[in-house]
Amino acid sequence: MLSSEAIQKIDYELTKYPADQRQAAVMSALRIVQTERGWLSKESISEVAQYLAMPEIAAMEVATFYNMYDLAPVGKYKITVCTNISCMLRDSDEIVDYLKAKLGVGFNEITADGKFCLKEGECMGACGGAPLLIVNNHTMHEFLTPEKVDAILDDLQ
Amino acid sequence: MLTQTTKPKAPVMTDLKGQTLVCLRTLQEKNPASLETYIKLGGYSALKRIVSEKVKATDVITEVKRSSLRGRGGAGFPTGLKWSFMPRYFDGVKYLVCNTDEGEPGTFKDRDIIRYNPHQLIEGMAIAAYTLGAKVGYNYIHGEIWQDYDTFEAALGEAKAAGYLGENLFGTNFSFNLYAVHGYGAYICGEETALIESIEGKKGQPRFKPPFPASYGVFGKPTNVNNTESYASIPWIMQHGGQAFADLGVENSGGTKLFSVSGHVEKPGNYEIKMGTPFIALLDLAGGVWKGRKLKAVIPGGPSTAVLPASVIEAASMDYDSLSKARSSLGAGSMIVMDETTCMVNALHRLSYFFYEESCGQCTPCREGTGWVYRVLDRIVKGQGKMEDLDLLTDVSKNISGRTICAFGEAAATPVLSFIKHFRSEFEYYIEHGKSMVGCKAEPQ
Amino acid sequence: MLNIEIDGKALEVEHGSSIIDAADKVGIAIPRFCYHPKLSVAANCRMCLVQVENFNKPLPACATPVADGMKIFTRSKSAIEAQKSVMEFLLINHPLDCPICDQAGECDLQDVAVAYGTSGSRYTEEKRVVFNKNIGPLVSTDMTRCIQCTRCVRFLQEVGGMMELGMVGRGEHSEITAYVDKSVNSELSGNIIDLCPVGALTSKPFKYSARSWELTRRPSIAPHDGLGSHIEVQVKDNKVMRVLPLTKESINECWLSDRDRFSYEGLNSPDRLKVPMIKHNGAWVETDWKTALEFAAGQIKDITNEYGSEALGVLVSPNSTMEEGYLVKKLANGLGCGNVDYRLRQTDFRLDGKRLGTPWMGCNIHEIEELDRILVIGSNMRNEHPLLAQRFRKAVANGAELSIISPLDNDPLMDVSHKVIVRPNDMVNVLGQILKAMSGLQRLSLCLPLSLNALLEDIKVRPNTQAIAESMAGHGKNYDLISPKVGIFLGNMALSDPRFTEMYSMAEAIGGISGAKGGILPSACNSTGMHMMGVMPNSTGMHARAMLEVPRKAYLIVNIEPELDCQHAALAKAAMEKAECVVALTAFKSQALEHANVLLPIAPFTETSGTFMSMEGRVQSFTAVVKPLGECRPAWKVLRVLANTLGLPGFDYETSEQVKQAIFAGEKPSAVVWRSLNNNLKELVEIHVNIKHEGLQRIGEVPQYKSDPIVRRSPPLQKTKYNIKPMARMCAKQLDALGLTEGDYVLVKQDKGSAVLKVKLDHHVAKGCVRVAAAHPDTIGLGDLMGDISVEKLSPQQIQAYASVIKEACA
């Protein structure tokens, strides 16, 4: 069951589209449910599809197409580091190595305490601030240095 | 240097010298994103005048044509001409769409518009909506810049409260509702028809054209899609006249342009400069090549444009014709600067992974070809390349290019073709020795 | 018209044609995988790239509309280069497993690769592997072979009406799948096998049973619903290996319903009766034809001699051929017996003798697509006529407004503009309301006859029926039409209803007033043919229902299992039990035929020649595709020899063709059909519109995979989700009214019969109704398909008492 908060937020998104185009809100609805539950289980996707009166498989298509949706648990904090060219030129590899060593996990792995998951990201459209990372899809940190990474991780409790 | 912190309300603006601010004109002020600041600079006056004086749509389009504004998203299609494609006498629902889905590596200019000067974009879209007869607009924002999405949505609320958006604006029968919508991690949605599919709640798979969005766009209705910077240029154009805007630039390239400079420079960030500014001057603005090193190569408009060796780019200036003459393209103005320590094989390897990862998978050449290219490059980087791989890469890339539904095919092929063309010896060295010529890490990711 | 040139050949094509259509018309082959003329254009495979003058890039022929003066080159250097490169891309990740692939020999990819591929590959990297999906008992998957053309996705979405497959993931990782572990449930799902250009989707029942080149292909006619779909039966070693559609644009297009496609598995059932059998001292004994026929003839003769010829009842399946029906009738009449009927699932015969001709669907199948307004009465379309439902779907997609009056609110997978979901009894009143509303719409000049007007006097028109009337009159949700093309159709539930006469009369009146086409949608492949030949009681004879209500001493039954194929299962069962003699012509041994005395093994449609007449009046003959199994003989031959043995004159037919000649009296069949088909009534039958009915009514639907003896024996069809045990299905309000909850056990009773069933909440059922499926062993104790029914909740003690039944019936 979608929470009433989630429904309220989805309903707000629905106001953006014509009444007969509920499916249009699926991008937001999946984001809202993922933010609330941490990741998108098949049940979550199914609930969203039902709420928007669209075929489940169509919602699944969307959830699997856009890579910020997580179809498996990602721990409490998902840390996505951009490694694309502009970041790579500014040594994102060193940031990745530092994170891997510090967290003791590789890409797509979750720390033993279930707190962090490290992901490799594609271009985030903020290359001027390279190297950079995003925490849980919605908080970006730019101009990373090992010291800054330490501070970011310390803040995530 | 504009982009230094993620906190949108208090940017560090150390150096606006040498820039000509149109789209980012609020940056001269203290609180650039606020409605107050924008209005202080004459914001929304053009919209108010056009709507309340009922300026003819054709007159607006003529003015935009006169400005010689060309689409800032990369294709460079004349904006005024594009607007004239919208069916004027169609009295059904029409939509206006803004493309703020910057996902091409090195491109981050629109982000600064929505976080530092959102109202100029809103005004530009409202003028476009008035001109094209659209009552509803969507700004599709790259999902990764979430804080900026929030900033823009807040600005929409401000504009609505102040009577610049909504029903019966300025007491006329003109109504315009603008909404923020978002992507969630798919580069392809920067392609306008993929973006439309995404707005409709589908996978971002580009549509075959024709029909073009002007006749079959969002929800099957006529739709005009422009880039953020294009719309944001409109209020200035309508305020100061198309000719004034054109005069800022050079022939065929009117106005100013935001250049996103990233990579090996001292001060990466966005720089708004006049079209036709020499590359050297732009590089200077960005503090020059970092660490006192020498320039090796520049990708001038994002990876879908051809990489240029230092000697070529240094002779070019930043406008459509000059870069086209240099056998590359202005693209979205996304300059990726590479210094002498850059391994071109590794750089291409990373870019090929990007295109492999971001291919939507809809049509055969791109779905299959990008994976092929990446795997061959991966093999080369791992020291298992063969000399004939270079011709294979070239051939496979040529077979992708021009045979796909959207321009992604060309975009994926261009770096391969241009990197190998300009830096072939570096690739040959790598294959022969199993390691990079420039001594940087040969490890793949 | 536009003038274009393809490969130097000048031609004129219609405005709006694509290059590929234009090329197809003149026989210039452009390779393609994703393009299909019946599906939306995806332009994703890129195989059809061609060169067009003045374009610097090759263009996809499927998605490029022709323009006047266009010069197209399909075999130029640039075109071939593009096509070859696409072929190379398609093959890099395609497994080279043709030797073990069922598609080999009929594979588009294989064929095109011969022309455009190379003998070696430049691709030396790792190939992609995709896990297979289980999408149900009909379609087998091997997803590594998939080339992502999305034909299957588009078919289910656009033709099937529901998006059951999708392409998830992105880029090279894209794969076709159903939602997580769901199966594909479309009643048209088998078509994705034909559509798949590679071996990713193949037939599960056919899997690994033969190579395509070993099969002999023979045309035939589908033997189930009234459509008369054209099929190709593929045969190996005198065995039917599979059935595929034959393209017949005006009937089945290029499609086939799953019932028509997979029912053949029932032909190879172990139930097949291979030799004649006689019951001797309560045990079945195999015998030879002569003995069996003499025994049967002797029994029939003895009884008719002793009790008179009316002591015999003759029931023949509407799925039997015209030849069989004709001979059955002739045989019965030859014995002086008028008790012969094919209308086994009908209960209301008041229209007998009142018709001007043979009722039919009232238009051609393809005309449905052109209708603007459609009213469907008492039909679960997808269950009854899957491909006809697809035509309705097309009409609706083209902008037609569909209105439905039914006791069931099953999703037809198309937009329904108006619907009234009520008890069958109340459907009459609803039709009366529509009629009244229509006559009240001012722009209609026609008036109702006084007699009808009087009937409608007390009827109150409600908003929903007013809306239907307005829709039929041309007022539209989106736009109005001055003279809409209207179609009105009555389905199986209406045909089985005790108030069919009222429904039909009302529908005819509405049709008259709105200038509608339409008629009945008879359930079986030869219902219309049987009616046209008059395989019905003569003026003194008994109809199917009466023959069971007033049991006969002897029955001759052809191609039926009485308790599964008759309107009133319990009556049918009792009548057979009680009869002194039952002679059954049947292709199957069956529990339902336990009370017969002689079983004469007849050939199913694949083993005999014959003729079916479809619901649109199309007379279609077919020949045997394999030899009869064992001692089976074509039923027309059996009937001829039986008549001979009975000493009846005029049974000298040497071939089924001669029987057909006799049926049409030497005339052209179409001429006879043209004269015969007529939906009008000679006179208005006395009807009552306003009958109140307070009790519960049964909706005794026949599930589509239970419709006839062959289908019931097809294992793959029985494994689909449509094969669920009968339950007592009611809407929430009805459950509340009866104090029931889902999962309770109830005793449902009709007449003297009963069944213990599990209760199921079903939002699709009208209040006042209980949906209990028929044609199932669990419900053979029950009565009329659309009759009164009562429901009692079982007490815990009763549940104990019925424990064994419950265990069996509700497992």
Image (spheres, coloured by chain):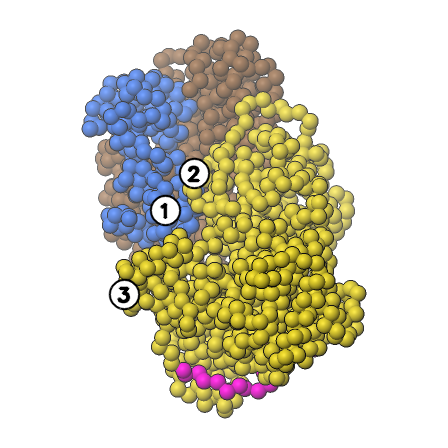
Chain colours: A blue, B brown, C yellow
In reply to whether residue C426 is colored magenta, the answer given is no
- Pointer 2 and pointer 3 on the same chain: no
Residue range corresponding to the magenta coloring: C675-691
Label 1: few (<14), some (14–19) or many (≥20) C-alpha neighbours in 10 Å: many
Three-letter residue code for mark 3: Gly
Disc 3 element: loop
Query: Distance between the Cα atoms at labels 1 and 3?
Result: 32 Å
User: Which residue is the site of mark 3?
Assistant: C739
The reply, left or right, for residue B112 in relation to residue C169 is left
Using a 10 Å C-alpha cutoff, classify the residue at mark 3 as few (fewer than 14 neighbours), some (14 to 19) or many (20 or more).
Answer: few
Please name the amino acid that badge 1 sits on: Ser
Q: Which residue is mark 1?
A: A46
Q: Is residue B56 visible?
A: no
Near-viewer residue (B41 or C146): C146
Where residue A56 appears, as percent x and y from the top left, is 41, 47
> What mark, if any, has residue C613 been given in the picture?
none
Dominant SS type (magenta): loop
- The reply to whether the C-beta atoms of the residues labelled 2 and 3 are less than 8 Å apart is no
Q: Chain of mark 2?
A: A
Nearer the camera: disc 1 or disc 3? 3
Left or right of A27 on screen, residue C708: right
Name above or below for residue C355 compared with residue B23. below
* Position of the C terminus of chain B by quadrant: top left
Residue A65's disc number: 2
Give the foreground label among 1 and 2.
1
Q: Chain of mark 1?
A: A
